[in-house]
Image (spheres, rainbow, N blue to C red):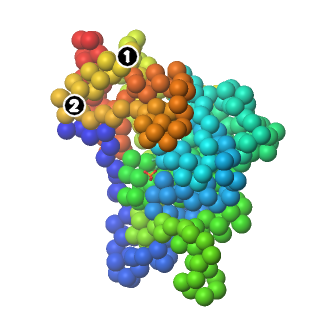
Amino acid sequence: MIPVNIPQLNGNEKKYLEECIDTGWISSEGPFVSRFENEFSKYIGQNYGIAVSNGSAALDVAIRALELEKGSEVICPTFTIISPVQSVINEGLVPVLIDSDEETWNMDVNQIESKITSKTKAILVVHIYGLPVDMNPILQLAKKHDLKIIEDAAEMHGQTYNDKKCGAFGDVSIFSFYPNKHITTGEGGMILTSDSILAERCKKLRNLCFEKGRRFVHNEIGWNYRMTNMQAALGVAQLEQIDTTIDRKREIGHLYNQLLKNNADLQLPLAQAEYAENIYWVYGLVAKSEEECARIQRQLGELKIGTRPFFWCMHEQPVFNKMGFFKSESYPVAEKIARNGFYIPSGLGITNEQIEEVAESLIKIVANG
Ligand SMILES: *Cc1c(COP(=O)(O)O)cnc(C)c1O
């Protein structure tokens, strides 16, 4: 069996976890939490880090912390995981969707300006699968129309846009530390910002909005989204290895690119954009049709090779349609990618031999179609 992802925990993870157990610091009060927040925010290039229980929680907090007026519009990609758009809707805001770029699979930045209205208050950027969104046009639009930038960098630990790290662009940015991300804490997430007031709001929202005065008297509702010391211990150890992680992810991507390059029936991930080299968070492929995509995944599965389909578009989510959102909207590029795309095993635990086995099997299956 070759699963889509196996994480690697072979640095100081065990040592730091033992420290948690030996000292008894296992809750969010333990010292690894602030250490992880400081080291990770510094690594990315924002002033403050607020560690939380997962990436989706980070989005909830980040978006509420901005205090946008209810009914405000937020520009979002349609091709994304549900988390960012769910948080927008939960806050009483209105997501306005953008189609994807055919090559990078990211939000097509050329389509944003025509969707900006007097109600637009933010652009929610989600970097997809390994290449960043083209940020310069977004920064210009944000400045011109006085919009906040919410940056979902959950798949981009260590990736740069030109020379600046992803996650350093948002008024608020978020990361996830789920086991398939470049840094994992099992479950975990972080909000980053350089605004001290926003940082304080995020800390408060993470911790049930406890007040500085009389404990257990609350003026606002928040969440318990705290990260444990044990999760943060893993995070500190994982961050120590980020450079080799990124190198290895790129190596995995290059190896697949090499092995699969002469295949006209598969669209490979774009290796390089003007502003970034792919880090292959996952190694995604787009087949010729929805049927081919399903057949390839099924036949790889029969060979015990794991795959996952691509994200499903937000405008086609039954739950959002039932709520009255995005009815009869259409985004043809994103629809095609969502239907025809899948990804193959590319986690840090994979060996080069396994990569060769996956590629060989894939080539055979595609040729027999
Ligand atoms: C993984 C991911 C999330 C959610 O993170 P969780 O920790 O799984 O809640 C959010 N956004 C993007 C783009 C992701 O890839």
To which quarter of the image does residue 73 belong? top right
Dividing the image into 4 quarters, which one contains the N terminus?
A: top left
* Amino acid on which disc 1 is placed: Ser
Q: Which of marks 1 and 2 is in front?
A: 1
- Give the left or right position of residue 174, taking residue 240 as reference: right
Front in this rendered view, residue 205 or 241: 205
Residue at disc 2, secondary structure: helix
Q: Label 2, on which residue?
A: 301
* Amino acid on which disc 2 is placed: Gly
Residue 277 in view of the camera: no
In the rendered image, residue 323, in percent from the top left (x then y), is placed at 49, 42
- Give the left or right position of residue 254, taking residue 158 as reference: left
Label 2 environment density (alpha carbons within 10 Å; few <14, some 14–19, many ≥20) = some
Residue at point 29% right, 16% down?
366
Distance from label 1 to label 2 (Cα)? 18 Å
Residue at disc 1, secondary structure: loop
Front in this rendered view, residue 55 or 236: 55
Front in this rendered view, residue 325 or 52: 325
In the rendered image, residue 224, in percent from the top left (x then y), is placed at 48, 69
Residue at point 24% right, 33% down?
305
Dividing the image into 4 quarters, which one contains the C terminus?
A: top left
In the rendered image, residue 360, in percent from the top left (x then y), is placed at 26, 22
Q: Label 1, on which residue?
A: 289
- Which of the numbered marks, if any, corresponds to residue 193? none
Q: In the picture shown, does residue 195 fall above or below 362?
A: below
Kindly tell me whether mark 1's CB lies below 8 Å from ligand 1.
no
Q: Which of marks 1 and 2 is nearer the N terminus?
A: 1
Front in this rendered view, residue 259 or 200: 200
Q: In the picture shown, does residue 27 fall above or below 87?
A: below
In the rendered image, residue 151, in percent from the top left (x then y), is placed at 61, 47
